[in-house]
Image (cartoon, grey):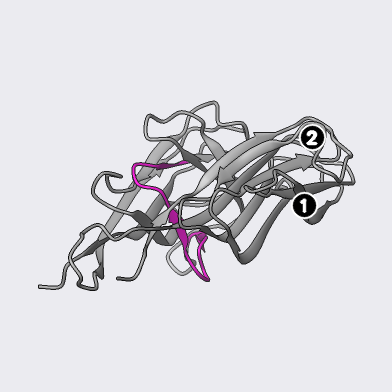
Amino acid sequence: MELEFKSALQFVTISTANSNLDGSGTTSLILTAGNNGTLLKTIIIKAQTNTQDGMIRFFLRNFINNNYSLLMEIPVYIVTKSSRDCSFQLVLPLNYSMMPGDKLYVSTQVADTFNIIVEALNWVNPSNSTPTENINVYVETSGAEIISTANSNLDGTGTMVQIFQAGAAATYNGCELTSILIKAMGTTTPGMIRLFIANSDGSSKTLFAEVVVPSVTQNGTNQSFSHQVLSQGSLSIRGDLKIYASTQNSENFSVIIAGSNWKYQIPS
């Protein structure tokens, strides 16, 4: 029987300066590979604050001998955020396989605050014990809400609206988000839409994307502002996780998220 995939997305916030390249000093554990190994798909680095020139470092800690290996260094450059300028952000496609029990850590060169979101998939044993190959079943799901209350915060505080919740973790192996559409419901002034991922109870709201909103005058012949966040690819999240959105300015936007919860089952 083939192994199944189960979402293992994790997110942490780091802010303590550490210039070491050997795994010593202050590092934060992001995830531990599952019993059958873990596939690191994508890493999102998103600053909560203004940034200085520096470095984000990722370390692998070997399960067998506990040695730290420097996996990669990601340069961070000077960015001054504002109501019209995004904070530092980088999306790293990886597709790197971790061995069972290995751990992934992260550190920052300078004491700026960064959110680290790791999209990962654990290989897990089949959900049934019969010698039959399971099939992957996708169940479409979506969420749509309106945001309108001004909120300039990047740290997960202030007024925001829950847009989406993944299917129950007890039922599904994860949820693949395929579309996040932001559509203004009128004329817009320069500002920002922010997207946060959070635990099932709404805690630990973590910024993972900002969308710059330009000045657009909507009328009978001009469309209002529209933006597709996931224009290429998708994002796999754990069951029960939630997506929230906020707006920099007190203007009306609809946020529509589409995806599919997935599970494995015996073919009928």
Q: Secondary structure at mark 2?
A: loop
Residue 56 falls left or right of residue 44: right
The residue lying toward the viewer, choosing from 210 and 68, is: 68
Look at the image and tell me whether residue 70 can be seen.
yes
Instruction: Kindly identify the residue that appears in the image at 88 percent across and 40 percent down.
Output: 20
The residue lying toward the viewer, choosing from 68 and 104, is: 68
Residue 263: quarter of image: bottom left
**Residue assigned mark 1:** 69
Q: Position of residue 160 (x, y in %)?
A: 46, 33
- Whether residue 149 is situated above or below residue 78 in the rendered picture: above
Instruction: Kindly identify the residue that appears in the image at 78 percent across and 47 percent down.
Output: 56
Q: Secondary structure at mark 1?
A: strand
Q: Earlier in the sequence, mark 1 or mark 2?
A: 1
Residue 224 falls left or right of residue 99: left
Residue 85 falls left or right of residue 80: left
Identify the amino acid type marked 2.
Answer: Asp
Q: Position of residue 8 (x, y in %)?
A: 46, 50
Label 1, label 2: how far apart the Cα atoms are: 23 Å
- The stretch in magenta equals 224-244
Location of the C terminus by quadrant is bottom left
Instruction: Kindly identify the residue that appears in the image at 20 percent across and 59 percent down.
Output: 128
Location of the N terminus by quadrant is bottom left
**Residue assigned mark 2:** 112
Residue 230 on the magenta segment: yes
Give the total number of marks visible in the rendering. Answer: 2
Identify the amino acid type marked 1.
Answer: Ser
Q: Position of residue 52 (x, y in %)?
A: 87, 42
